[in-house]
Image (cartoon, rainbow, N blue to C red):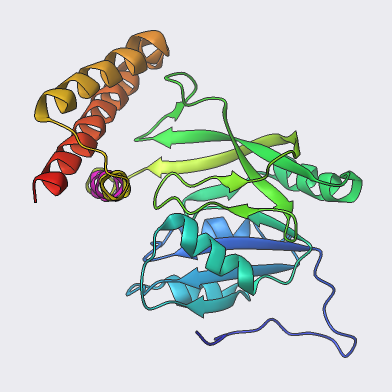
Amino acid sequence: MPDRYLRAEGSGGLSVKLSAMLITKNAGPDFAKCLESLTFADEIVVLDSGSTDETVTIAEQFGARIFTSEDWPGFGPQRQRAQSYARGEWLFWVDTDEVVTDELAKSIQQAIGQATENQVFQVIRLSWFFGRFIRHSGWYPDKVVRLYRRKECGYNDALVHEKVHCPGAVVGTLKGDLLHYTATDFASYMTKSVRYASDWAEERAQRGRKASLLSACGHSAGAFVRKYMLQGGFLDGRHGFLLAVTTAIYAFNKYAALWIKTRR
């Protein structure tokens, strides 16, 4: 996996305090907005898994260090691979559909200058769903650990819905939202949802788990009630209703895929 592009370094070398980390595949034309919001970092590290669009070209324009992988081991293992290429003391992870606000960027810089040993930081994601930022439905505040010291932590082995493994760490919360443009195109959103459901089912099947179509229906109905009623999705109006429906579809697909895999 060769390093395809290196940022220019002075004669004294580049002191890398903070690495912005991304794993990519066909990030799309809006990828530039993500990278532009990361220019405060000392380096941008991209591990691409076979993009056929302009992802790599766009990353090169922002001076990213780009690596490629021929296979896809799952989200957790892929992030582990990317971490092995980082040079920064601190790693800040973003997805290609996320944008760092100015307030969050300043908070990150302050955090790494004041952090104690074995301390990690979580961001608050504000997600965009087909024309509206969702502030209820269990989506906000969406807190997720994204900033940590490279030698102290790393992602787990989960194929999907991976998390940073940081046992015993003190968790701080960064100021400013991480804007998450998770749903801008319906076809792309549903395609990603099906892929996640398949990866989830594969992981559960490997553990020996099973499911039935009846349980798929039950989990789907429960997901709708939880999202729309218990988590206040109705407060997000029509967008909240649509989100609850797509969440129910995702829940059904997960358990239906697991039923299919175990039957084979």
- Decide which of 252, 141 is in the foreground and name it: 252
Task: Inspect the magenta stretch and tell me whether residue 197 lies in it.
Answer: yes
Task: Inspect the magenta stretch and tell me whether residue 225 lies in it.
Answer: no
Q: Name which residue lies at 46% across and 75% down.
A: 56
Q: Name which residue lies at 70% across and 64% down.
A: 19
Q: Name which residue lies at 52% across and 48% down.
A: 98
Q: Is residue 97 above or below residue 167?
A: below
Q: Residue furthest bottom?
A: 11
Q: Name which residue lies at 55% across and 77% down.
A: 66
Q: Position of residue 11 (x, y in %)?
A: 88, 90
Whether residue 131 sits left or right of residue 33 in the image: it is left
Say which quarter of the image contains residue 239: top left
Q: Examine the residues drawn in magenta and state their main secondary structure.
A: helix
Q: Position of residue 150 (x, y in %)?
A: 72, 60
Say which quarter of the image contains residue 223: top left
Q: Is residue 236 above or below residue 144?
A: above
Total labels drawn = 0
Q: Is residue 130 above or below residue 56?
A: above
Q: Position of residue 108 (x, y in %)?
A: 76, 47
Say which quarter of the image contains residue 252: top left
Range of the magenta residues? 190-199
Q: Position of residue 226 (x, y in %)?
A: 34, 15
- Decide which of 206, 90 is in the foreground and name it: 206
Whether residue 231 sits left or right of residue 116 in the image: it is left
